[in-house]
Image: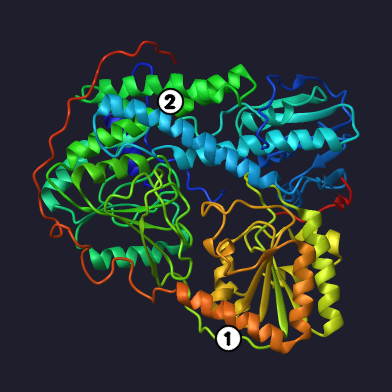
Amino acid sequence: MVASRAAREARKSAGRAPHFAGPESCAPASNRTAHPFATEPPRPSRPHRTTMNVDALLLLQPSDLTHLAAHPGRWDGLRRLMIDPGLVEQAAATGIDVQPFEFRSLDVPPYFQARILTEAATRAAALDLALTRHRESLFGPGALAGWDQGLLRQGFVRVLLFAALGRACEAAFPERRIGLFRPSNPQLFYFDSRLTTDAFAAGSPRWHLLDEYPAGANWEPDAFGCCFDFEAVQRIAGRDAPQAVVHVPTTYRHANEYATQIAAAFDRFLDLPSAFWDIPLRREEPLLQPVASTVGAPFREACIVYAERARATLREHLREMLPDEAGLAAQVDLLSRRALMQALNFHGLRDALAGHRPRFVLTDHDTGNNGPLFAVAAALDAPITIVPHSSYVTGAIPHARRVEVVERDGFATPMRSVWGEAVARRGVALGPQVERRPRTQVRTVCMLVNGMVSNGLFHIDFLGTVRFHRRLAELCAAHGVRLVLRLKPTAPGLQLFAAATGVPADALARATRPTLETVAAKTDLCVSFGQPTTGTISFLAAGAYLMHAAAMAWSTDPAFSPAYFSDGTVPCTTPDEALARIEALIASQDVFAAYAARQYAAFGARLDGPGRIFGDGPTPGDAPRGAAVAPAARRPADTRAPATASAPPGQRGSIAVSTSP
């Protein structure tokens, strides 16, 4: 996070703007590590307000649990239900008495998650295209697409997921009246919000609003109230002629490696901050200012016009999904403020960097500024390098003009822009490197589980995972093969897994302590279960044979699943098919060796060879590093007014796990 100096500097010039006022402090929001179905939209209704006259309390999101813990005794005696195993784990860590808690697993159809992801991506693309038309009509020609597609997609996933979960609970729960909590804030990115409760409750009158609380986790009331400090950027660019403009929020996993390679490749670079998940590399001053400080900027009026047009378009596209008028209005207002920030950053940076052609170094996890930065790079005819926040790039790519994506070697992701253009891609040495050796016999099997915390973005088939583990354990025991259950260290679900499987929680915890590379080096066959995870590449890279099993179908879009799960490199099967194949591979060393050799060769063909992020020299067509160039001519902005305008303690008790829907 940018130091408090940013807040002090911003406060010196802050004021109150009219409708789209920014905050008086531009101290970025706290760094966060936190990280949405069917095509039928929720019906326009909202949970009924009620008192304690309900049969149970259903906790939907982490903030609900925090609210419960803040009022000890207030809802004592009321049975507490959960459908997200991650909430069970959080409850066990809060010191709340978990005796009244009951986890219920839902029986959902095979295409439950795939339909959600596909609909979210479709809606996001349609809305982003509508906003792109506004930008093009107001800002003139340029690469102005894709500013919101990735951000909208994740937000839509959460809303659509809980709408579908509401319908599933309506069909499965026997209680007649069930209480819900609701935070009052709109949805920021994909975090806890009123939209979760509203979407879930829209399908049935049995849901009753038991209590409302001020704000959910990670809510920032001044979100999108700051933009870049364009005068400071122009001053630094004029003084230093930076060779690169860097903006890499969220990249905690590779922060040190990125910092080292960026410093080695560029003597002078401009490090732009993010209000969320900031990764400062080399920054002498805050480079943020309140949106209110842009009063007087020649491009401000065009930006306000764009934000108001965006407001009308957002309402048109969102009103079908958001059942409550107050929730819709708050959400539209939040996203309109983001639209204003984006427009200001596009115009301000384009003008501040005119005459320069630095390389832009960006990450795929967008915190609101990727679209404008891509557009500025295109306006300057500057190259772009995209680095992954984790292993490969999953975010939307606004355009392919002089863009290169780097990823951990072996993913071989078929990268496309939001227009479907092929995007240059290159595998590099990223993360721990391991010795790759072929496997010829199954002595150790690893069951890899992505995690038990959904972050409101996917449904976890918990009981399906438990059943598969039980059958796999029996199979391995019958053949004398060692089985390792590897849960995600940051979201293991230890208490719930221990309660459901009988495996002690400390034994499950011990399996999370070695690095994934260490586990992979000792594994002959790995079967990942449920949600696809990028962690599987560690097993391919080590030479282990990899399979994937899931009861639900998952989208093959690279945004949700590594490409090797859909191109034939890794077999993806149902749980029954996976168990049958595993037994056959264990039983015959020759059969396993043949399967493993084919996958070993297929993965080898995906490798580009270890290399540096920035290669050994400039991309063909690059201007010399730091060279100044003549600014491109630009069409004057259209400033006509729009037709319309608006505004862990120890666990106590035990958790009941329901084994049937």
Query: Seen in the image, is 94 located left or right of residue 419?
Result: right
Q: Secondary structure at mark 2?
A: helix
Q: Is residue 232 visible?
A: yes
Specify the amino acid type for callout 1.
Answer: Pro
- Image location (x, y in percent) of residue 602: 52, 75
Seen in the picture, residue 101 relative to 524 is either above or below; the reply is: above
Residue 440 or residue 82, whichever sits in front: 440
Seen in the picture, residue 627 relative to 327 is either above or below; the reply is: below
Query: Seen in the image, is 303 located left or right of residue 449?
Result: left
- Image location (x, y in percent) of residue 218: 55, 40
Q: Residue at x 58, y 67 (%)?
A: 568
Would you name the residue on which mark 2 appears? Answer: 336
Count of numbered circles on the image: 2
Disc with the residue nearer the chain's start (2 vs 1): 2
Nearer to us of marks 2 and 1 is 1
- Residue 504 location, quadrant: bottom right
- Residue 325 location, quadrant: top right
Seen in the picture, residue 6 relative to 484 is either above or below; the reply is: above
Query: Seen in the image, is 429 located left or right of residue 600?
Result: left
Instruction: Name the residue at the top extreme.
Output: 643
Q: Residue at x 32, y 29 (%)?
A: 135
Q: Residue at x 61, y 77 (%)?
A: 520
Specify the amino acid type for callout 2.
Answer: Ser
* Distance Cα–Cα, label 2 vs label 1: 54 Å
Would you name the residue on which mark 1 appears? Answer: 438
- Image location (x, y in percent) of residue 420: 41, 47
